[in-house]
Image (cartoon, rainbow, N blue to C red):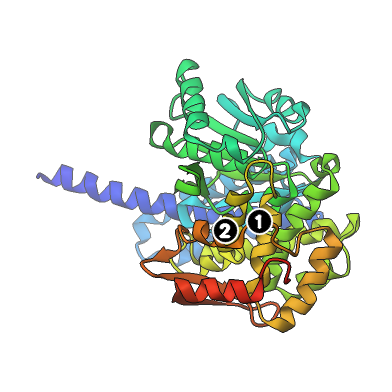
Amino acid sequence: MNLLEEARLEINEIDREMARLFTRRMHAVEKVAAYKKEQGMAIFDPVREQQVIARNAGALEEDALRPYYVDFLKNAMRVSRAYQKKMLESGALCARTLRMELGEDSYDILMERGILKRAGELLQLDRRVLIVTDDGVPRQYALTVAAQCKEPVIVTLPQGEGTKNAESLQRLWKTMLQHSFTRSDCVVAVGGGVMGDLAGFCAATYMRGVDFYNIPTTLLSQVDSSIGGKVAVDFCEVKNIVGAFHQPKRVLIDPDVLKTLPPRQIANGLAEALKESLTSDAELFAIIEQGVTEETLETVIEKALQIKKAVVEEDEKESGLRRILNFGHTLGHGIESESGLDGLYHGECVALGMIPMCSASVRERLIPVLAALGLPTVVEGDLETILNIAAHDKKRSGSDISVVWVESIGSCEIRRMPLEEWKQMIRTNLGKGDA
């Protein structure tokens, strides 16, 4: 290797590091833009820029490089001003924003009433876009997104968990091939958790991964499955057994779309918010316990998202802390599978799954809240069948299983116990008709 090749390799390495630092800098610029908007400040502050240039240039050790570094700083500030201007003009700063910090896979979660109509401003839709929705979602939602895309392709699937399978996945792959989708194109989910999981897994696997955006239209998906990057399909009657981690590029949450949901679907979503409150936030539990109103619903959504965001940032690939998000899910998945396609909703099953996995004092407060929301508190199916199905859970290792236990509201612990001991705990705390 000659000196030229060595120098080029070194420059390539430096450029990669600069790309990482540039991303960090622009995220800081976003915070500056948000503050300036809130305070009514101008984007361009010549005095501030001169101060920054003088300070940073003075820190440079090599005098001969100083004028070039000054040019470099001026160009960086010009790019920053352009980015701030674009953010202000696009309205991105109007939305309530949560930033999922996952290094190169970081993304924004934007929440605002009516944000669906601004998808074209906030997402990169100037390309081929596969819009995945189901026949239970108002058709206008997908059409609203499609109208903002350069080349939209809408696929409408049957609603329900039964759609989240390999056959539906193949249909999406085939559609993308037929319309000549490339790695530069993207997939957008417009629907609940089933569509998010399926479309996300399609995006993760087509050409080894394309961009994915999530626009959740149910309360359940808004507070839980829309963020975190876990995408999957069901296989051989086992829920989410085939999947991947594929983070979305951005998530848009529009509380206005919840107005078309029946009360049962709202309760279905609140069950997941309850789950997160029990493990992590006593204040959120109290809000739900007092009764969720139209005015407090957005607060519930945001607080639930903040909990999941913090957990995912700490443990993206579910190797430790993220397991607390499975509270109520081990038994819940067994109930969901046993009840069949026309049985209980996911949140309803999680509600039942939480009851036996907390202390008696917590159950005394939890069960009345579930009942007030119209969520089930008694297992109607065959408990032994449910336990046998739940025994196939991904969290099982040999004859042991990891479970989440809530001793007091707002905190939890992960326990590893023999499978038979766990089954007996369920029988004791949630015998049929003995809530």
Residue 44 showing in the rendered view: no
Residue 53 spot, x, y in % from top left: 54, 58
Residue 359 spot, x, y in % from top left: 67, 81
Q: 293 above or below 363?
A: above
| Residue 418: quadrant of the picture | bottom left
Residue 154 spot, x, y in % from top left: 63, 23
Q: If the image is split into quadrants, where does the C terminus sit? A: bottom right
Viewer-side residue, 100 vs 359: 359
Measure how far apart labels 1 and 2 are at the Cα level. Answer: 8 Å
Q: 188 above or below 18?
A: above
Q: Is residue 385 left or right of residue 69?
A: right
Which secondary structure, mark 1? loop
Which secondary structure, mark 2? helix
> Which residue does the numbered mark 2 point to in the structure image?
386
Q: Residue furthest left?
A: 1
Viewer-side residue, 49 vs 26: 26
Residue 418 showing in the rendered view: yes
Q: Residue furthest top?
A: 178
Q: Is residue 320 left or right of residue 272?
A: left
Q: Give yes or no for contact between labels 1 and 2 (Cβ–Cβ under 8 Å).
A: yes
The crowd level at tag 2 (other Cα within 10 Å; few <14, some 14-19, many 20+) is many
Residue 333 spot, x, y in % from top left: 57, 55
What amino acid is labelled 2 in the image?
Answer: Ile
Viewer-side residue, 375 vs 432: 432
> Which residue does the numbered mark 1 point to in the structure image?
381
Q: 60 above or below 362?
A: above
| Sequence-earlier tag: 1 or 2 | 1
Viewer-side residue, 63 vs 258: 258
What amino acid is labelled 1 in the image?
Answer: Gly
Q: Residue at x 81, y 49 (%)?
A: 264
Q: If the image is split into quadrants, where does the N terminus sit? A: top left
